[in-house]
Amino acid sequence: MSMRTTPGVRLLPNAITVLAMCAGLSAVQFALNGNLTGAIGSIAVAAVLDGLDGRIARLLDATSKMGAELDSLSDAMSFGVAPALTLYAWQLQDNRVGWVAALVFAVCMVLRLARFNTLLEDADQPPYTKEFFVGVPAPAAGLLALLPLILTAHFNHAGWWANQTVLMVWMVLIAALAVSRVPTLSLKTVKVPPRLVAPLLVLVAMLAAGIIMFPLISLAIAMVVYLLHIPYAVYRHNWLAKHPEAWEAPPRERRAIRRRSQRMGLRPPLRRSVAGAARRVRRRYNHPNSPRRSWRRLELRRNRNDTNR
């Protein structure tokens, strides 16, 4: 019997999905006990496991409809319910409006995942749309919602970011980004040029060192960088929508198309007759032996005595 048909091997992706759900829900227990670092770590572990289960399923040819449904349920629990309950247990227990914010966040995560599943079945999407997510993905949204908690755990005190009003507004904003139509980049389709592989590996090593030595602030910086990439993702999405010739082009050809379009947009080409006339005028009045023409002699500026005529 081959490895791909072994029942135990085919069960592995679903087991990882269940572990991700258990890790995400464990964040609530850590928050109730006041262990902020444990709550943050649980959501982060759930995000890592969520990124692994689908890839392992495709690698082992163990994808199934049950696995897809289980993955969506795990994401809803780990990145919707768990962050909402964690933030509520941490700072919003004595505020009834805080429970409303927690409900809004959890519901928006569920709606975001439902829309994601429907988009997977839509075969009429243009090819370039596979490079983007519609809205902020659930794992990123779950970690972004915990940013005030991450800052509090790192600095070991609750600053202005831990204020109840600020926290509720932050939760609603992240929920709105998750269910919005704002495009965000999908790392699964990012192609790295060969000349950038070595610098990228160095950056990965630096990121790993930062996570080991300063895990909380490194995670916070990563979340801020993720938010800052959204305007670029919107620009890239809009540019691709207007340039169908670049949809299936390799990265080098796509960069060439972008450079050509930028040159045409910034400096439109002159007509041949106009350009030739401009060159003749420059040669006529810039010749070293030609008499110097002043603005007045060229009758481009009136004399002062003529202003009252």
Image (cartoon, grey):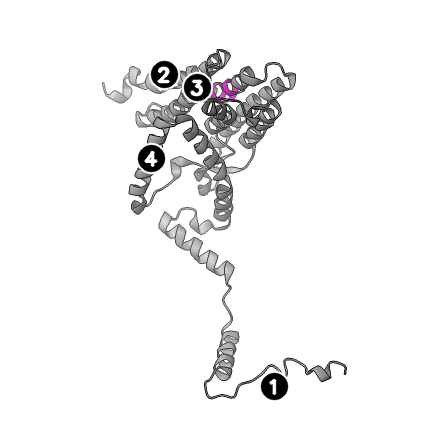
Q: Residues within 10 Å of mark 4 (few under 14, many from 20)?
A: few
Which is nearer the N-term, disc 1 or disc 4?
Answer: 4
The residue that label 4 is drawn on is: 206
Which is nearer the N-term, disc 1 or disc 3?
Answer: 3
Which is nearer the N-term, disc 3 or disc 4?
Answer: 3
Instruction: Give the distance between the C-alpha atoms of the residues marked 2 and 3, in whole angstroms.
Output: 25 Å
As helix, strand or loop, the secondary structure at mark 1 comes to loop
Q: Residues within 10 Å of mark 3 (few under 14, many from 20)?
A: some
- x, y percent for residue 268: 51, 64
Q: Between 86 and 296, which is closer to the camera in this rendering? A: 296
Q: Is residue 243 above or below residue 272?
A: above
What is the three-letter code of the residue carrying label 1? Arg
* Part of the protein shown in magenta: 76-83
What is the three-letter code of the residue carrying label 4? Met
Do tag 1 and tag 4 residues touch (Cβ < 8 Å)?
no
Name the disc covering residue 297, or none.
1
Name the disc covering residue 37, or none.
3
Do tag 1 and tag 2 residues touch (Cβ < 8 Å)?
no
Instruction: Give the distance between the C-alpha atoms of the residues marked 1 and 3, in whole angstroms.
Output: 80 Å
Do tag 3 and tag 4 residues touch (Cβ < 8 Å)?
no
Do tag 1 and tag 3 residues touch (Cβ < 8 Å)?
no
What is the three-letter code of the residue carrying label 3? Thr
Q: Nearer the viewer, mark 1 or mark 2?
A: 1
The residue that label 2 is drawn on is: 15
Q: Main secondary structure of the magenta part?
A: helix
As helix, strand or loop, the secondary structure at mark 2 comes to helix
Any part of residue 121 in sight: no
Q: What residue is at 51 percent from the left and 38 percent from the top?
A: 183
Quadrant into which the C terminus falls: bottom right
As helix, strand or loop, the secondary structure at mark 3 comes to helix
